[in-house]
Image (spheres, grey):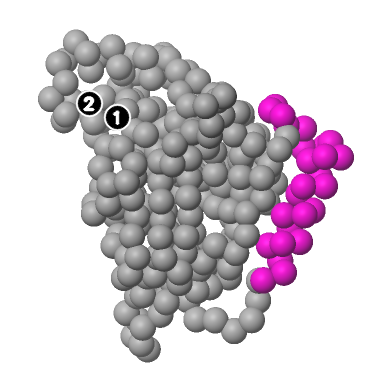
Amino acid sequence: MLESTTRSGPPPVILEVSDLNKIYEASNGPVMALRGANLTVRKGEFICLLGASGCGKSTLLRIVAGFETATEGSVAVYGCKVDGPGPDRGMVFQDYALFPWLTVQENIGFGPSHRRIAPKEVAKLTEKFMAMVGLTDFADRYPHQLSGGMKQRVAIARVLANDADILLMDEPFGALDALTRSTLQEELIELWRTTRLTVIFVTHSVEEAVLLADRVVMMTAGPGRIDCEVDIDLPRPRDVASLEFNTLRRDVTKRLTSHIGGGRRVAATADS
């Protein structure tokens, strides 16, 4: 349940995905990765896109980011059609995608610097977001000198410094060890509380989805479409050992596995 709902009504719709189709040309013919995907997201929501590998989650996220174009359908942010990447949408990848020749400070300040913001203001923004993700003492380190968890903190801070409205995260903690993953999950929720960003988080982990999300959006095995949604009406912080948490986890798992399987062809480029 969204915590920022006000007396005047629910928050405004920030993202509208309408009748989205995506077809890839494969060597053995066209392959449909998405078919009739529809999604509405309100400002400040934390949404988890959940589904098996090959269901089109990452394809959907890349189209929302503007990195790919849909074959049919549309994506709109605040009613304005998305026709390419923009600073209103920031993407965090599993492989960090940092500039290896830039320091932590320079990576975080890269976006503001290229928006012609005054150098003093860029420095303030960089310091603010380095502190927010706990990297002030590592300002002059390069990516190869950082752990996986620290690299992901830099990637998140870089999006925050760009003043994005929507944070898009493509299995960002999938390559991390369990302890680091748990720590970053907690830190992400705290950042979300602080910034009130809208977050769309792709995962194939039911536990991660129930732990993080206001609403879990499940996709079919392929061609991808939105199969169902589950509101996660649990207070934060959430206890993964609690009866309430595990009841919801079982419900989400049951719904997810009910439509996995069957014959399907998935293009190599539509990996998740």
**Please, what secondary structure does the residue beneath circle 2 have?**
helix
Quick one: which residue is furthest to the bottom in this view? 28
Q: Tell me the magenta residue range.
A: 235-259
Q: Are marks 2 and 1 in contact (CB under 8 Å)?
A: yes
**Vertical placement of residue 62 versus 87, above or below:** below
**Residue at image coords 27%, 47%:** 80
Residue furthest toward the front?
8
- Of mark 2 and mark 1, the one earlier in the sequence is 2
Of residues 73 and 189, the one nearer the viewer is 73
Give me the disc on residue 162.
1
- In the rendered image, residue 225, in percent from the top left (x then y), is placed at 51, 66
> Label 2, on which residue?
112
Indicate left or right for 231 with 89 as reference. right
Residue 239 magenta-highlighted: yes
Residue found at the far right of this picture: 243
Residue nearest the observer in this picture, 43 or 31:
43
Label 1 residue SS:
loop
Query: Is residue 250 one of those drawn in magenta?
Result: yes
> Which amino acid, by three-letter code, is at mark 2?
Pro
Q: CA distance from mark 2 to mark 1?
A: 6 Å
Magenta stretch prevailing secondary structure: helix
Viewer-proximal residue among 233 and 257: 233
Residue 177 is situated, as x and y percent measured from the top left of the image, at 61, 41
Determine whether 144 is above or below 95 in the image.
above
Residue at the image position 45 percent from the left and 69 percent from the top: 36
Classify residue 212 as left or right of residue 160: right
The answer, for residue 19, to whether it is visible in the render is yes
**Residue at the location (16% across, 15% down)?**
119
Classify residue 270 by image quadrant. Answer: bottom left
Q: In the image, residue 170 lies at what x, y percent?
A: 46, 49
Q: Residue 52: in sight, yes or no?
A: no
